[in-house]
Amino acid sequence: MLRVALIGAGKMGISHLSILGAHPDVQIVGVCDTSKIVSEVLEKYSGFECFTDYLKMVDKTKPDAVFVAVPTKFHYKMVKDLLERGVHVFSEKPFCLNPQESKELVDIAKSKELINQVGYHNKFVGTFQEVKRIVDAGYIGDVQHFTGEAYGPVVIKKKSETWRSDPSEGGGCLMDYASHVIDLINDILSPIDSCKGAMLKSIYSKQVDDAVYALVGIETGETGVISVNWSDETYRKMSTSVTIIGSKGKIISDANELKVYFKTKDFPDGYSKGWNVKYVTDLTEEVSFYLRGEEYSAQIDYFIKAVQGIVPNVINTFESAWKTDLSISIIKKSS
């Protein structure tokens, strides 16, 4: 049994806690949150030992791994403290406020040989995994253009100030929302390393951007478009999609449906020349505990197995999240 603790019992923290609590190889040894109301409720109804100081929790409970689910501005110090104590770390996204902090944490984790992961859950969505497999195998040929999009109703009116509306806490559409799309493009194709022009637009927010539109370039030389808006009330929830045009075909995929067109007879098993449609239900492996989507349990299962030494620590590492932080900073500077 792995001894696991959690820092931050907000929306994502509670989700992680639910999945971890049902995991057969995990013993939850502590939960930390600065809200006394949250801590008292959890202690009363869950039986977990709760703390308001994460270092006291770590020193007392001696966890093998800790999940960090707090606003981004706290990630750098917390994760650094945990790594220096020899603890494996799963951090929520985006990783850090700037790539300099991210890189330092990458180096510490490597030097101490600790398992590390950041919660970009799209890499565990069946449709996007299949997109990556098709692209990596060369079935759509040389990539000519790509588009990464995300739309949703996060901020649809002027509202009271929260961490999401504060740039110093990691708020804003670029950091908190577009990071998902940027990380996905970085993983499927190649890291974004240039920006020809970007617009960060405020729609309802005063201090941060609510929409991001950018023409970007990736390390392998191709260019594409990032289009993200978290103030779009025509969507019920976040909708993320990628379109990739290649010399031998075209892919259009979101988290539910993958459409792919093959121009030639060079295509993978289970496909045919012309248009093909696959659904996430065809492409997703079952998980032992379902909450919000298989991808949330799948990413935790992967992290636990990496700590156990069953799988390599190669998906959603601190290093890949650092490259996403770099891409974010490039787009921000261009705007």
Image: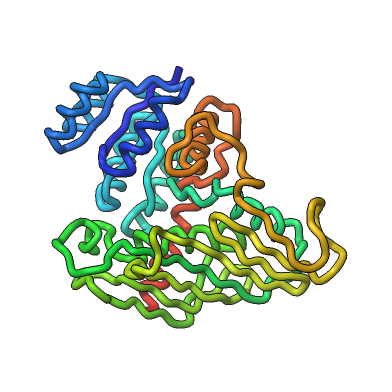
Q: Is residue 313 above or below residue 218?
A: above
Choose between 13 and 257: the one closer to the eye: 257
Visual colour scheme: rainbow
**Residue positioned 34% across, 53% down in the render:** 96
In the image, is 41 to the left or to the right of 143? left
In the image: residue 243, left or right of residue 16: right
Of residues 226 and 276, the one drawn nearer to the viewer in this rendering: 276
Residue drawn at the location 51% of the way across and 33% of the way down: 301
> Percent position (x, y) of residue 298?
52, 38
Q: Residue at x 28, y 36 (%)?
A: 7
Foreground residue, 264 or 302?
A: 264
In this rendering, does residue 83 appear at all? no
Q: How many numbered marks, from 0 up?
A: 0
Location of the C terminus (image quadrant): bottom left
Q: Residue at x 28, y 41 (%)?
A: 78
For this orientation, the residue located farthest to the bottom is 197
Task: Tell me which corner region of the image, top left, top right, bottom left or bottom right, holds residue 314.
Answer: top right
Quadrant position of residue 202:
bottom left
User: Relative to 231, does residue 170 appear above or below in the rendering?
Assistant: above
Left or right, residue 282 beside residue 64 = right
Q: Is residue 184 above or below residue 3?
A: below
Could you tell me residue 67's position as x and y percent? 36, 36
Residue furthest to the right in view is: 265
Quadrant assignment for the N terminus: top left
Q: Is residue 104 visible?
A: yes
Task: Reply above or below: 1 against 203.
Answer: above
Q: Could you say which quadrant of the image residue 131 lies in?
A: bottom right
Rendered location of residue 109, percent (x, y): 44, 39
The location of residue 6, given as percent across then percent down, is: 31, 32
